[in-house]
Amino acid sequence: MSLLDITELSLSYGDKCLYKNAEFSLFKGEHVGIVGANGVGKSTFINICTGNTIPDEGQIRWQPGISRDYLDQHAAADAQQTVLEYMQASFSALFEKEKEMVQAYQRYSAGEEEALKKAEKYQQQLEAADFYSIEYRIMRIAEGLGLTAIGMDKQLGNLSGGQRAKVILSKLLLEDPDVLLLDEPTNFLDKEHIRWLSYRLQRHRQIHAFKDAGGAAAGPGR
């Protein structure tokens, strides 16, 4: 079963027709590179997939329950947040659960016997989610994209546009969606970091649809 089906897609801007009765399907395990010259509608196609652009005609159907994310290099973020805090936000639900666990243990220490069961339940959930490896996972991606050289305690408001784009990409990789849509993810990466990203995408379980800055396919698959 396909994860995404696009049928009878048509879109024009003025007298320029980008798509006419186009069709596309995305299947589990695929890595898709969108190829074409500048101005043919590669970024527009990704925006159609995300729902940010509405076509003139056509149907875009995602399989229910599929998580997907999009590399938006202009995504809003708290300028006062540090690089580390921004990346940790990928696991905000787990950090909140950790707080609840600590509070439950504190209530148990104060004599509330029933709180122990809740604390143990939270503990099991955190272990199942691999919570205690979060720091390692964050640093592994940060090193791969060169963020440790920038400084994990640097505030987002003090980053250049390229550095900020790296941070946003790192957060997407940490969030681990089923489908990851990347529009020119290598724009601000040097060769070493491009190799690292390519290796990670090839070995990862995610499905990817993306184009690179030059319009060439940026990964294996069709």
Image (tube, rainbow, N blue to C red):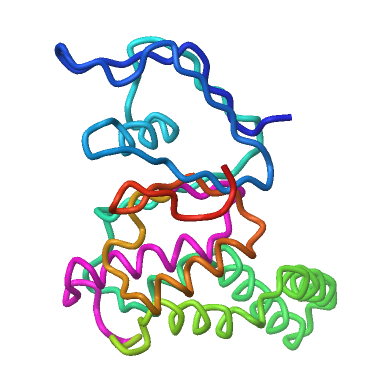
**Residue 23 position (above or below residue 124):** above
The part of the chain drawn in magenta is 153-181
Q: Quadrant of the N terminus?
A: top right
- On the image, the x and y values in percent for residue 177 come to 57, 52
- On the image, the x and y values in percent for residue 39 come to 21, 34
Res 113 quadrant in image: bottom right
Image-based side of 215 in relation to 181, left or right: left
Instruction: Give the residue drawn at x 64%, y 65%.
Output: 203
Q: Main secondary structure of the magenta part?
A: helix
Viewer can see residue 70:
no
Q: Quadrant of the C terminus?
A: top right
Viewer can see residue 27:
yes
Say whether residue 193 is magenta. Answer: no
Instruction: Give the residue drawn at x 23%, y 39%.
Output: 38
Instruction: Give the residue drawn at x 72%, y 86%.
Output: 110
**Residue 218 position (above or below residue 36):** below
